[in-house]
Amino acid sequence: MNNFKFFHQLGVKYPLIQGGMAWISDSSLAAAVSNAGGIGIIAAANAPVDYVKNEIRKAKALTDRPFGVNIMLLSENAQEVARLVCEEGIKVITTGAGSPGKYIKMWKEHGITVIPVVPSVALARRMEKEGADAVIAEGGESGGHVGELTTMALLPQVIDAVSIPVIAAGGIGDGRGIAAAFVMGASGVQIGTRFLVAKECTVHPNYKERIIKAKDIESVVTGRPTGHPVRVLRNKLTRQFEELERTAAPLEKYEELGAGALRKAVKDGDTEYGSVMAGQIAGLIKKEQTAKEIIEEIFAQAEERLGAVSFSSVVKMDA
Ligand code: TUI
């Protein structure tokens, strides 16, 4: 399905899902994105179930529009959160960092739209077979936990492999990225990094400032030897991770260094020793705006770009 019917059926104005960002995307950001016509997402990450329940209740008070929850499958609370979303009548689930296969049946029985993030064709195929409604093909340009492929390479291969809608993610920060994704056949986009600087995003101001100051080549992937590589902005912490790799340190050392690092950046504003997760598109982001301003701006831009291109204006050489 290569059109916007999927999002239309969900009752939203724009074919946009906000990326679930651990420790960051709470009820404030999710409700703002949903109120502006996208699908806002509360990230459950490693948080206790009661925290997630409270954020869901707060989001319900802030918006009448559909919003979702992202379930991080490496979390020890994943199973409990998987049940919570059914009890709370959540409409949309996205998942990350693993396969949600064992929960899909239960979610479908509760009428939930299930949209796993996939880093490969193999997982996309498996998710379709197991009953997912759509998949998010997320390239390694994105922030946080990343797969191996770029969005440009992953997206068309996933689109060819499945017949459910495919949503593009990774490296999309404005209307040009959205237009490119649509031209390639995506049914929508997932955007995370750009929403880090939304006024309604409650991340520490130092984190926002670090995003706004970021240059194109400032993100790096750390933690490859652990099997859970994460894209973050370069700082003193990433240099310590690089030292661990250089000296082939035991895996416990990575765990020690990473423990609490995201919290340090998000809550304390320590952008030197904290983990500043962000995608490669951070270099494009120049100012804080409301979620509504961001969404309206990028979709107007996408429409303009899509109107501006035609095969003959781009490719044909004959005068
Ligand atoms: O999940 C994300 N991004 C995240 S999760 C996160 S919290 C975390 N922090 C440190 C280490 C690990 C997690 C921060 N950012 N994006 C979606 C995503 N999912 N990217 C890659 C994957 C993925 C990887 C393997 C999805 C499925 C998968 O399957 C393996 C399998 O079981 O077949």
Image: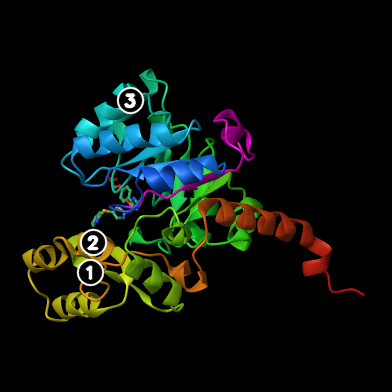
Find residue 107 and report its horizontal and vertical position in percent.
Answer: 35, 25
What residue would you read off at disc 2? 262
Image point 51% across, 52% down: which residue?
291
What residue would you read off at disc 3? 88
Marks 1/2 in contact by CB < 8 Å: the verdict is yes
Secondary structure under tag 3 reads loop
Find residue 269 and report its horizontal and vertical position in percent.
Answer: 27, 68
In this rendering, the answer to whether 256 lies above or below 247 is above
- Furthest-right residue in this view: 319
Q: Tell me, yes or no, if residue 141 can be seen here.
A: yes
Of residues 147 and 96, the one drawn nearer to the viewer in this rendering: 96
- Furthest-front residue in this view: 61
- The amino acid on which the numbered mark 1 sits, given as a three-letter code, is Gly
- The amino acid on which the numbered mark 2 sits, given as a three-letter code, is Leu
What residue would you read off at disc 1? 274
Q: Give the range drawn in magenta.
A: 1-21
In this rendering, the answer to whether 287 lies above or below 26 is below
Of residues 123 and 279, the one drawn nearer to the viewer in this rendering: 279
Say if disc 2 is inside 8 Å of ligand 1: yes
State yes or no: residue 96 in magenta.
Answer: no
Q: How is the image coloured?
A: rainbow
Of the two numbered discs 1 and 2 on the same chain, state the one appearing first in sequence. Answer: 2
